[in-house]
Amino acid sequence: MKSEMKHWRAAILLLVVCAALALRALLQPAPASSSVAAIEVGDALGSASSAGYARAYAPRSFVFPADHAAHPDFRNEWWYFTGNLRDPAGRAFGYQLTLFRIAIAPGAPAEDSAWRTHTVYMGHFAISDLGAARHLGFERYSRAALGLAGATTTPLAIWLEDWRIEAGDGANPRWHLQAAAKDVTLQLTLEPVRAIVLQGDDGLSRKSAEPGNASYYYSVPRLATQGTLTLDGQRFAVSGQSWLDREWSTSALGSGQSGWDWFALQFDDGRELMYYRLRRSDGSSDPLSAGTLSSAAGILRHLHSTDLTLEARGEWRSPYSGLRYPAGWHLAVPAAGIDVQVVPKLAEQEMRLSVHYWEGAVSVTDAQGRRLGEGYLEMTQDGPAVRTRWR
Amino acid sequence: MRLLLRAMLRELSQHPLLNALAIFGIALGVAAVLAVQIASISARASFERSTQTLSGHTNYVIEGGPAGVPEAFYRTLRIELGIRDSAPVVSGWVQLETDGRWCELIGLDPIAELGFGRLRVASEASRSFSPADNGVWVSTQLAHSLPHAADGTLTLRAAERSHRLPLAGVIDIPGSRLFADIASAQVILGRGGWLSRIELQLDDRQAQHLRTQLPADLTLRSQRERNEQVTQLSSAFDFNLTSLSLLVLLIGAFLIFSTMQFVVTRRRTLYRRLYALGVTRGELAGLIAVEAAILGSLGTLLGGVIGLWLGHGVLPLFVRTVDDLYYPLATATLTLTSVTLLKVTLLGLGATLLAACWPGREALRELHSRAPEHQARADQRRVRPLLLALAGIGAALVIIAGSRGLPAGFLALALLVTAAVLVMPDALRCLTRRLHPLPLLRRSLLWRLALRDIDRHRQRTAIAVVALAVALGSALAMAVMIDSFRSGVEHWLHQLLQADIYVQPQAAVGNHQAVPLAPGVVERLQASPGVAAVATYQRVETRSGQRSVQLIALDAPPQARAGYQLISGEMAAAWAAFDHGAVLISEPLAWHAQLGVGDQLTLASDHGPLRLRVAGIFRDYGSEHGRVLLARPYFARAFADDRPGSAGLFLTAGTPTGEVLGPLAAQLSPLQALDFRSAAEILTASLAVFDRTFSITALVRVIALTVAVAGVLGSLLALAIERRREFAILRVLGLMPGELLRLLLLECGWLGLAAGLLALPLGLGMAYMLTAVINRRAFGWSLPFEISAETLLSTLLLAVLAALLAGIYPALQLARTPAARTLHEE
């Protein structure tokens, strides 16, 4: 009796073991599809080698309006518009519209498919709704194929889908900007009130000691701006002042440089100041940091790091990205009688896109807080942003 | 209760062979169900897994006609319609030059993919997926099976051209797939200007809005719908196989039934004693249930193991069939869900417990009565099964008349089989009684003994006979159905393949891509000496509503038209209407879409929906989803690509094929690599696919028969054990061991023959149901009904052989046992 029970038990046990073994052998884990990550922007934009592209070695003679259009021999290029706007009731806004051209391989591609291209466009669009203390940032990418994105010379236009930058006639033309995302639509007309400023050495802006680590860089520091901004269905007639930065390069930032702070200030007395401070990995300023101060009459003064003092005031930590940015700046150019505070009109103007950086409207005041002007400020941390903009 | 359990276990262990057979029966039933389930679920899951990973976060698709979506629409979509979460896809099949394997090449725009999160470059050595890179990336699975090219390139063949491309890297995605930038994919696949589809991420409101804005030639549907449409292609096939495996389980349940009845019958005395001692009815019922549960669990467990093993073996066969006939599925990894396991376990245990119910109830009912008079009582209640059977047949007829669905068809079939099973014991009794008066048999003592035995034990033997009859009947039905099907297909192909020679581009062989005949080929064919007429065909996949349909652009001389056998519509009128833009549709399409002559059919074309009048319905076994014939000029108006894909040559009377073929091949070879085939060769190849398709069904048939033989063996063993004393007395009375053996084999042989005789009407009835109802409902086509005397005779022969085979062992055992010992033991 006992032994028979054992037989049964043994038989059952054997079956269970067999089944378990068979199951283990046959049940293969399904591939974990949830872990599949997106293609990184860096992946899609291809290798970082600068071989095969033109480089900025020496000053060149600029020809306008031709140089407002794209320079496809260089790897990177951008049309960078920022500005401070107001509606008739006094509600203040800041805006940024930037189209980046990024070459992902040198030379012209084969012409065997309408999709074939070596160029990708990236767009950044932001509105700082200062009255409502909010900042909206958007990003777009597209390959420059099929008319989805691209740049033409005549008529002069740069577009990324329905984000468009168009220029009128003339060497220093009027610009039309158009961008829409989600519940924001911006349409602006920009009339230059200043001549084109060639930055650096007649437009050659050296970013590191190594030859070729430079860009061609010019600005239109003040453009009278008007247009409409639609926010959540509410239409604002806006006017104010914009700043255009144009830059193209193949390789700019050198090793040991970790980021920068860029100032574009428009003083109420008619002067404009552009200064970029290249920050080194150890936190110090790179001696190649540079800028210009232009007077109302259009007289240029080049600024070097020794010409001015620049101190960060306080710190703002982004609750979203965790990145830390200076909460304000003290900027002084003693020789020009400038001693100002540069204060963000809103602390949270961080662009949290495929790259993270701070870009926003700022007030320029004296030590007592009296208004002297306004402008735009960009602050980057070490990271992909550096590579995208300055690579 | 412990004591009861021990008593029961002891009983169980006393007849290991009998119990083993019962377990084996259940196990095979469970195994068959599990194997079929595993194969179909794995195939489906593999397909879904790979499409799901590939669809990533996208949930909607924009599709066009057969040519696809014009690429310019993508710009409209993004800029004018403002739909930014959208990605263009160009896909198609390419052949690896190294081993001739076909893989799907998928062309994507890496920039549009940003944020869709569906491609991950797998290894460090891989280059990043960038638009400027004109290489190809391979899926992980493909990377493992790829021979290493020394120069890091991969050569692909597509659209009749070879492309040597740099191997750029590996992408972590299931299936055998290749990836390339969309521009490269367009070039490789020869799809300049077109996208295969646009995939999107939309919420329902956006989708609704977008639908209203799409041009007429494009449609928007959800990824789910699209994938379902693909997997539904094979659902009739899956369903048929599952039903077959359930049949095996049913036969397995018969085995349990007979074993349990034996066990319970033997224990009548024990139960009655236990009852007298105070064990309650409930406890006894529990005891029987536990016993059944043990047999059931063991059977299910064993069945699970066998099923996994079988499923593993069947899977490639299944994948091959699905790939041949339904949707691309290069490989499938075995997938086993806990739901499948649970379902199969419940099925195995449930069938066992259900099978044990009836004998258990009988035993409990007899607790009060003094003598086992169930035989008489069973006779009294004979009317009831007859009535039930009639009710079943009536219900089945009502269901058949009142429905069109496949499940209802199977329900009717099940009802009819159940009805047949109910009347079978009576039919068996009638058969046996008919034999009594036969003078030839009356003279033989052994025959008389045998007949009486059978009659006396018919309660016991009936189950075995019914099980065998059902198994044989199913096997017969399957054989008749497949024979009918095959002869239908053969006849249809004979009729259809009217041309002497068929020509298609070599690159189109294998059906993975549509390759047009090169320009000038058709003209040269027409101008060739000895060629009387040329028919051209172009096949495209399109949709009618949610249904996939093959549309064939036909340019057919009268010789070719004669090949289409119209089953509705008058020949001359139908072809006259065809020449004016009406269509001929295949029988399955007419059935599924409920279309008749004169009705309107709407098809998706490259220029919006195309409304066409149906002029005739032709017989067709080529596609269960439906085919549509449209005259070439009308096709050209609605579709972007109207280049014919193949041609049929009709030679002038008396011209030998060989005489034309050689010069023709030589003349055309500079134009295109062409494949010439005679109608006979196509027929042979098609029938080979047909036979491969039914090889799985053959396996299920073998399992059903094995289970049935095991069932007979079990029943006979049980009978032999019961009748030991009876035979001992016969021996004592002077029956020689040889005579006893003969007696037993006579009984077995008769049982087998009876089962065979019962199986014939059952099998033919089932075959009729399968061909006229099930096939019609599953695939939409009607089949001829072909019965060969050979199939019928072999069924009878198989029945007798199976019974004799099953009877030999118990008979030998009985004959060998010394009579005195048996009597003494008793």
Image (cartoon, coloured by chain):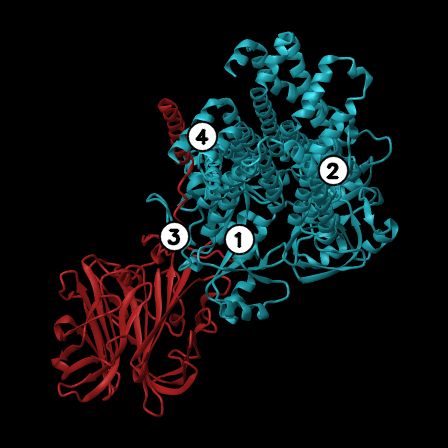
Mark 3 element type: helix
Q: Which of the 4 image quadrants contains residue B758?
A: top right
**Relative to B631, is A209 on the left or the right?**
left
Mark 4 element type: helix
B83 above or below A87? above
Residue in the foreground of this view, choosing between B722 and A34: B722
Name the residue tied to disc 2. Answer: B765
A109 above or below B435? below
What amino acid type is highlighted by mark number 2? Gly
Name the residue tied to disc 1. Answer: B90
* Chain assignment, label 1: B
Around disc 2, counting alpha carbons within 10 Å, would you say few (fewer than 14), some (14 to 19), or many (20 or more)?
A: some
What amino acid type is highlighted by mark number 1? Val
Name the residue tied to disc 3. Answer: A34
Around disc 3, counting alpha carbons within 10 Å, would you say few (fewer than 14), some (14 to 19), or many (20 or more)?
A: few
Name the residue tied to disc 4. Answer: B8
Same subunit: marks 3 and 4: no
* Chain assignment, label 3: A
